Each structure stands twice: as C-alpha cells, then as structure tokens.
Amino acid sequence: MKYTIFLIPILISFVGAMMFKHPPKKINLIIGFRTKESMKDEKAWIFANQYCGKLWIKIGIIMLLISICIYGLIHFKLLILTEIFATIFILLQVAVIVISTFIVENKLKNEKDK
C-alpha cells in the first residue's frame, strides 16, 4: 500500500508529457482534454491539450516530491502509513487533478476572450 502514493503522480506526469509533446491532432471522443469548451474548434483543442499537459507535468512532479517526502518519513518510522492516511492522500491527489480541469477551462476561456 505504501508504494501506491507514487502511482498517481507518475501517471499524471507521463500523461501530461504525452499531451504536451503529442497532443491529439483532431478533436475526438476517446483521448485528450475533452470538455465542451476545448472541443469547439481545433485551435482550442490544441491549446487545451498542451496547456493541460504542461500543468499536469508540474502537478505530477510536485505530487511526486511530496510522495517521496512522505515515503521517507514512513521509511524512517517518523510517520505511520495507515490505509486511512493513504486513502486520504490518494483522494487529495485525485482532487488536484479535478481542480486542474477548472484551471485549464479558465485559461482556455481567457485565451478565447483575447
């Protein structure tokens, strides 16, 4: 269970890098940053995917560093990892991902208003 705290940060960093470097070229219903606003046109689609990719890389690295610190505290017995603590931490990681969706949407709306 204690290694699970690394799963989301590594996954988010990887997906973010893929979205940033290789955003889906065409709007689709399977892969990419799919929201009503991002799917309005190709320009919005590319912008939203690249911006979200950059944001997820940053978020993933920050979450990974926090996870490493928590793991260090656990390893040196300064913190006891319980299932409850691990679950709360993982839920916080998921919440950060959901919040990032709103950040990308706001940035996309601001870009369209320019």
Image: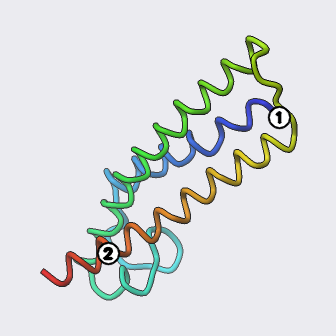
The location of residue 85, given as percent across then percent down, is 80, 41
Residue found 48% across the figure and 51% down from its top: 15
The location of residue 8, given as percent across then percent down, is 62, 45
Going by the numbered disc 2, the residue's amino acid type is Trp
Choose between 69 and 16: the one closer to the eye: 69
Which quarter shows the C terminus? bottom left
The location of residue 21, given as percent across then percent down, is 31, 50
Considering only vertical position in the picture, is 96 above or below 60?
below
SS class of the residue under badge 1? Answer: loop
Residue that sits furthest to the top in the current view? 76
Q: Neighbour class for label 1 at 10 Å: few (<14), some, many (≥20)?
A: few
Left-right relation of 25 to 93? left
Q: How is the image coloured?
A: rainbow
Which quarter shows the N terminus? top right
Residue found 40% across the figure and 44% down from its top: 58
Considering only order in the chain, which callout, 2 or 1, is on the residue closer to the N terminus? 1
User: Which residue corresponds to mark 2?
Assistant: 45
Residue found 70% across the figure and 48% down from its top: 90
Choose between 71 and 30: the one closer to the eye: 71
User: Which residue corresponds to mark 1?
Assistant: 1
